[in-house]
Amino acid sequence: MTRRRMPTTGAAVTAATLRAGTTYFALVFVAGLALGTVRTLVVAPVTGDAGAVALELPIILAISWVACGWVLQRFTVPDRASARLAMGALAFLLLMAAEVLVSVGLFGRDLASHLALYRNTPEIVGLSGQIIFALIPLFRTRGKAGVSNINTTTHRREATAGHRRTWWRRIGLLVAGLGLLVFGATYATYWGEVRATRERLSAGSQIVQTRHGAIEYATWGSGPAVLVVHGAGGGYDQGRLLAAAFGGDGARWIAPSRFGYLGTPMPADDASTAAQADAFADLLDQLGIDQVAILAISGGVPPSLQFAARHPDRTAALVLLSSAPYTPLTAGEDARRVPRWIYHALFWSDFPYWVLDKIARPSLESIFDVPPSLRAALSPEEGTFVTGMIDAFKPVTWRIEGIRNEGAAIDPAAAYALESIIAPTLVVHTRDDGLNPFSIGTYTAQHIAGAEFVALPDGGHLLLGHHAAIRAKVGAFLGDHAKRGPSS
C-alpha cells in the first residue's frame, strides 16, 4: 500500500496549501448555504436574526473542525504554523469573496451597502465565527499533535483508491442528507405560510353572485363610495393597500377582485375589460350603490376606463395611476425592463415566488420596479407599502388566471371610447415607470376631455417618494367630485 508523502519542496508545499485552503472553503461554504437557508426560512422568523446566527454558529464551527481534519489528512499540509495559517487565510478570503458575490449578485446590494452590514449584531457574530473558521487549521494542528501531525509515522494513513472512494461516498451521503433536511424544513415552512395566507384571504372578503358569475369584494369605511381597482397580480387585498396609500379616509371603499383573481373565477365566455366593467356595475347593483368614484392602478385602469365609458351616469370621478397599455396601445408599448419569461417562471407555482421572497427580496423588488437605489430612500410608510404589494402577490396560484388574462386590455377587438368619458379625471404617471411607459399616461390624459395630468419626474411604477403628495391630491380631487349621487 502506498503512503501519502509529505511535500518537501517550496512549490509542493504551496500547491498542497492552496488545494487544502480551497477545498476547506468549498466544504464549509456548501454546508453554510444549507444551514443559512434553514436559518433564514425556519429559525429567524422565530428567534430573530441575531438569535438564529447564534444558534447556527456552533454547528457550522463543528462542521469546520471536522472538514479541516479531513482536508489536512487528504492534502498533507505540513505541520508548520505558516502553512496552516496560509491555508486558513486562503479559505477566509475565498469565503469573504463568495459572500460579496452573493450579496451583490443575488441581493442587489453595492459593495458599500454590503460592508455596512457588519455594523449589525448578526453580521458581527457571523464575522467572529468566520475568523475562528480561518484559525481552525492552526489549532487543529496544535490541539492533538498525534492526530493532526501527519509527519509522525504512527498516524500516517494509507491513501489507497478504495479509501478515497469511501471518503467521497461519505461526503456525497452527507451532502444528500443535508439537502433532504433543508428541502423538508423549507417546504414545511412554505406550506404552513401558504395555508395561513389562504385562510386569511378567504376570511377577509365576501362573495356575491352576478350575471357574470361570482364576484369577490371587500368593503370598509364610510362616506362617498369609491371603487378601488387593483393591478396585475393583485386582488381585493391589493385594493386595500392602494386605498390606504393613495386614498386615505373619508370614503366607503369597495375593492373587488377582478376576473381570475382570488375568489373571482374566470367567466366561461367573455373575460374582456368591457365585461369586467359590467361586472363592476353588477357588484354595485348588489350593494345598492348608484354611483362611485374610481381609483385604479396599472392593469386596473383599462377596465376602469371601460366602466366610465359604458356607465357614465354611475361614474363620479376617475383617478388613474400608472396605467397599463390598452387598445390601440399595443404590447410594443409594454417595454418592460424585466423580460416576460421571468414573470411566467415566477408565477407558474407558489413555491418559486415564496423562495425568492425569502432569500432574495431585493431581486424580487427590482421586478416590481423598485431598484435598491430607490428602496434605500423610502420612508417607513412607503417601505411598508412595497412590502405589502409584494406580499399581495401570494399565493400566486390564486392569481395566475387573472395574470394570464391581462392581455385582454390590448385585444385588437377591444375599443376604448375615451372621448366619450365625461367624468372628472386625474391621471398620474412617472417618467421613469419601468413597467408601463410614460407615453401611456400622456395618451390617456390627452384623449379624455378636461383630464388633469400629473407627470412625476421619478418614483417608478409604484410612484415611490410621492405618496404623501399624491394622497393629498387624490383626497382633494375625490372630495370635490365624489359626492354626487348616493353612496350607499
Image (cartoon, grey):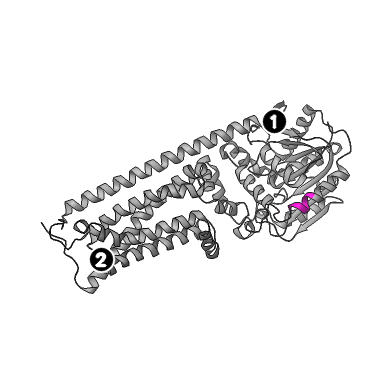
Total labels drawn? 2
Image spot of residue 122 (x, y percent): 49, 53
State left or right for residue 150 relative to residue 371: left
Residue named by callout 1: 215
State left or right for residue 173 relative to residue 54: left
Q: Give 472 or 273, whichever is nearer the viewer.
A: 472
State left or right for residue 182 relative to residue 377: left
Residue 468 lies in the magenta stretch: yes
Which residue type does callout 1 highlight? Ile
State left or right for residue 177 relative to residue 324: left
**Disc 2 on helix, strand or loop?**
helix
Which residue type does callout 2 highlight? Ala
Q: Is residue 485 above or below residue 373?
A: above
Q: Quadrant of residue 273?
A: top right
Residue named by callout 2: 16
The numbered dot on residue 12 is none
Image spot of residue 63 (x, y percent): 33, 51
Residue at the spot 64% in from the left edge and 58% down from the top edge = 374
**Disc 1 on helix, strand or loop?**
strand
Q: Give 406 or 245, whichever is nearer the viewer.
A: 245
Span shown in magenta: 462-471
Q: Nearer the viewer, mark 2 or mark 1?
A: 2
> Quadrant location of the C terminus?
top right
